[in-house]
Image (cartoon, rainbow, N blue to C red):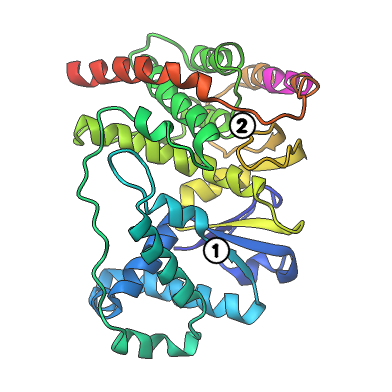
Amino acid sequence: MLYFSSTYLQNKTFQSLEDLFQNVSPKMVTLFYDTNIVVYHRDFYLNPRHFASNSSNQEIIHALRYLNEQVSRYDLDVFAFLGVDESSRRKSDFSINIEKRFQTHEAMMQLLYLDYNDFDRFIQHKKKEDPVIDNGEYPDSMLPFLQQDSIYQHPLIVMYILCLKVILLYYKFEKNEISRKEAIDELNHFMREEIDSISAMMYVLCLHLFGGSDDFKNIFFPKKSLPINERLHKIFNGAIDLIFPTIINKLQIKNLIPIFVSTDKRISKLNSLMGIRARFNTNETYSYSPELIQADFLGRLKWTKEEMDQLYVVPQSDINRLNRFDGRPRMTTHLLKYVKPLETVLIKLWQNA
């Protein structure tokens, strides 16, 4: 249910804080909660008795109780504001719903400071509160979301564009129009030559995807049964999930090790495969600064040794790109011009399927 990972503890995913603390001292970590954990806190807080009466929520309550107990026991730093913001945005344009954000923040603060011995009493005596409901509809393009100023904006623009591109490449791969190697070559060209924005997370994901592993595919691939606007939103949410671990590294506090706490095994595992070797920090919140990443891979991939040797050459050459970094914040709003054309091609494929 709970997974703990960090790019500072490469190729390790922990399912308990006790296991994590076998590798790093509690005094050296900061916990960053993902959005799902924030939503679980909010739903539980607003109507704990109803939440607890649902048998399918028992594991969630156990996880919330466990987190509360461990945070108190080890006096851990916890940051949940990214998840608070993401779970409080309007469907129509991704802007913050202030009332919902306040309600979510209040839920997190109350539960973080609730003594774990009082959990059962809280369930019995907390008065029900009505959730703030967003009755809006998702738009037919995610462009309005990407135009919203947020801490996500610049890396999110890149990742959403890459998600669209990868889905289109995968359609071509499934139809045998391109080989797995040609798909990766086209992705590399797109990242390095067209948008000049490289995502190690997406590159490693695609080495698995086109290498025959579906472990990470459903992070952003939508179900065919969804309406088109909801499919695009699924891709958008997947893009947020994929940048979340990178964002928390940018928000590293007091030289503590940022630990990504998630209920999503796929994202945690993918994050654990990344290992930071160098960072170039502008100290700008909105900067998309470059990082030098070393990556591991799961087994069962279908790449030959010769192909893997070729695939390693391109990322290794990116070290030279770091020499061109001038220390200024990296903005990506100029890449918004790619969004609608990629969405349009994908929508046509869906409509003709």
Q: Amino acid at mark 1?
A: Gln
Residue mark closest to the camera, 1 vs 2: 2
Neighbourhood count class around disc 1 (C-alpha, 10 Å): few under 14, some 14–19, many 20 upward? some
The boundaries of the magenta stretch are 312-320
Q: Can you name the residue that lies furthest to the top here?
A: 177
The residue shown at (40%, 63%) is 102
Horizontal and vertical percent for residue 117?
48, 90
Secondary structure state at the residue bearing disc 2: helix
x%, y% of residue 197? 60, 23
Looking at the rendered image, the quarter that the N terminus falls into is bottom left
Q: Earlier in the sequence, mark 1 or mark 2?
A: 1
Task: Label the magenta part by its dominant secondary structure.
Answer: helix
* Residue plotted at (25% across, 78% down): 128
- Decide whether residue 143 is among the magenta residues: no
Q: Relative to residue 288, is residue 132 depicted above or below?
A: below
Residue that appears at 62% across and 57% down? 259
Along the line of sight, the residue nearer the viewer: 167 or 117: 117
Decide if residue 215 is in sight here: no
Q: Residue at x 52, y 12 (%)?
A: 186
- What's the CA distance linking mark 1 and mark 2? 24 Å
User: In this orientation, does residue 87 appear?
Assistant: yes
- Magenta span contains residue 315: yes
Residue that badge 2 annotates? 200
Q: Which residue is mark 1?
A: 15
Rendered image quadrant of residue 53: bottom left
Residue furthest to the front in view is: 98
The front one of 223 and 347 is 347
Mark 2 Cα within 10 Å, few/some/many (few <14, many 20+)? Answer: some
Residue 305: mark:
none
Mark 1 residue element: loop
